[in-house]
Amino acid sequence: MAEVVLNGVGKVYADGTRAVESLDLAVAHGEFLVLVGPSGCGKTTALRMVAGLEDVSEGTISIGDRVVNQVPSRDRDVAMVFQSYALYPHLNVRDNIGFGLRLRKLPKAEIRRRVDEAARTLGLEEHLARKPRQLSGGQRQRVAMGRAIVREPQAFLMDEPLSNLDAKLRVQMRAQIARLTRELGVTTLYVTHDQVEAMTLGDRVAVMRKGVLQQVAPPQELYDHPVNLFVAGFIGSPAMNLLTGRLEQAEDGGLTVHLGGQHLAVPAELLDRRPALRAYADRQVIVGIRPEDLYDAADESGEPPAGTLLRADADLVESMGSEVHVHVRLDVPPAVTDDVRELAEDAGAADQVPDPGTAQTEVVARFGPRTRVREGDTAALRVAVERMHFFDPGTGLSVADHAQDHVQNPKEKS
Amino acid sequence: MTGGAAPAASAPLPAPEAAPEPGPGPGKRGDGGIHRSLASRIAGRTGGGAVAVGLVLVALFWMMPTFGLLVSSLRSPQETGTSGWWKVFTEPGQMTWDNYDRLLSDDDMMRAFFNTIWITVPSTVLVILIGALAAYAFAWLEFPGRDWLFLIVVGLLVVPVQVALIPVSQLYGDVGLFGTIAGVVLFHVAFGLPFAVFLLRNYFAGIPKDLLEAARMDGGTDLTIFFRVILPLGRPAIASLAIFQFLWVWNDMLIALIYADNDSAPLTVALQSQSRAFGANIEVLAPGAFLSLIVPLLVFFAFQRHFVQGVMAGAVK
């Protein structure tokens, strides 16, 4: 077990492409850190540099107290689980798991003991004599895990290990990986493009975009205090609603945010936490509202407080059983920035990016299953205004948030 | 070369799947029955019994010369001089082991036989070993000029052996390799390597990169990766190469004729000199020829089981 530290790490390919840019990241002893981001954001490159499968162009990588830039993979004492599993097809499960130990010339009995133990942990005992081709996808995935854990390495590196499994199995294996890594307490660097995996597995989550680290924080922190539009839009499903609004000085000295013809009050408490908002008075801002921060006003007793209500027509109601997603159209211009475009591209919906010229934005609200809103109704949405997010439309950065100060590890900057 | 090579080229091909014959009934939808191409209809019928019978007949017809040679090698020269080998069907009594007895006690022929083995086995083993190592480097190691070097190797494929005959003769004369088995082996290895490197490099390049990286993470050096991952996975390609190279060298006469002397001449040369010295010297030629074709057959059957399909199954995904 050891600390893995990336210090100003960069990767430049021969053709000049920068895959990773001055990445500072520290994975503490026994920590499970997830690197997440859309495809092509450099997360896999970063992992492969730690593995020693890619050269480091700039900066240093250390494992334990050793700088490993020049150390070949085999001497780094880290184990990797590949997206494709990369099982040796000519070896049976026992030999696949024990391959690394055999190369290290451990005594036969010791190899046997460790492989048996790993197989027991992973429920592979009956399959030890089989070849990879005789195994199901989930079993192959477990063999790949087994090959990593028998090594008892300083750190695990996992490159989207679950992305080849079908949805149900993925949830099972996710839980198994979480249990296993907690039990073993081994430092783990895990790469995924799936934000659900990132949130559920990570002690901390690092979000990357185009080779640049955006934010590193524990999952809840990341969810509650995204530093910019990209993180806000990437983490969470359904995604945060992003609207173009205008902050205006209210008569009582507070601020209100105008969304089309409607307005929401910015509570004093929020203003205290984000004093920089005052500088945005009479300016455009991007307002972010999580779907679960929208409540069905008709379902609540009592009159909602003034300045917390939005009315809009529901054009789609999706029932998930445990919750209902209500899609409404608000008469405000959508927030379209580079971040939003990239997020849409990553979701494979580049053509779905709304035209910033339109005056309507689709907003998703997550209601309880008992909501009576039907398609075509005008829904009354109560906004949990104290949890609104504000972003600068130019930079995409979150408007100064005190929470931000403790979001990041002092050693790191984004 | 032709006699032995035929089974090597045809046998490893997998039997085509027996495609179910789509009934051209009226209920069938459009593109199924009538508009299928001629080729696909023929392919569809290869599973049928009539085709199997046809193929067996062709195979028997093709094997006739070999069978004739076998029978001739079992008849006395007098019988062969007066009647055709098919007489043996009516008079099986004329079959005899005499020719083989004489062949096995003929020191010159036996020395030639062992010379062939001493030439062929090292030539094959060396070509595979050097070729595989080079192929691994060309496929997976990064060094400057790698792809240019490989292109040159590919270019060497089309260099005919004849251009090297005279310069190599002079060279061998200078270094004292002329008339030795080592000289013949060296020549075969040199001219066998381009094809070996080409074939193996392309096969190795198809091995998923993740496997090599996994082995690297598991603590493998280039050498351990080569022996424990690449060689086992390259088995089908290595087996085909072994057969090709073995046959080529085994059946070679040109190079042996030039670079071997009487003591190091292989069977091909010895047989050829027999036919020249005594005209139709059938009682030596027939068993000798049969001996020289049975060994490649045995080699083929020994390596055939390595043509396993789907060696890579289960490796990735």
Image (cartoon, rainbow, N blue to C red):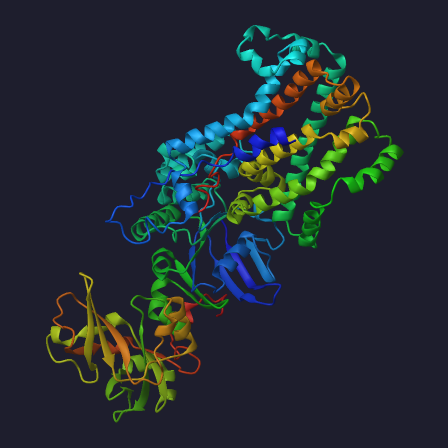
**Residue at the farthest top position:** B93
Q: Return the x and y of residue B257 as percentages of the image width and height.
A: 78, 29
Residue at figure coordinates x 66%, y 21% from the top left:
B289
Q: Is residue A300 visible?
A: no
> Image check: A88 left or right of A263?
right
Up the image or down, A318 lies above or below B122; here it is below
Up the image or down, B37 lies above or below A279; here it is above
Q: Return the x and y of residue B105 as percentages of the image width and height.
A: 72, 9
Q: Is residue A216 visible?
A: yes
Using the image as rendered, state which of residue B274 and residue A36 is in the foreground: B274
Up the image or down, A284 lies above or below A182; here it is below
Up the image or down, A284 lies above or below A22; here it is below
Q: Return the x and y of residue A269 as percentages of the image width and height.
A: 28, 80
**Residue at the farthest front position:** B82
> Image check: B166 left or right of A127?
right
Residue at figure coordinates x 79%, y 42% from the top left:
B163
- State the count of labels: 0
Using the image as rendered, state which of residue A269 and residue B167 is in the foreground: B167
Q: Return the x and y of residue A284 as percentages of the image width and height.
A: 36, 87
**Residue at the farthest bottom position:** A251
> Image check: B161 left or right of A96?
right
Snapshot quadrant of residue A119: top left
Residue at figure coordinates x 38%, y 57% from the top left:
A202
Which quadrant is the N terminus of chain B positioned in? top right
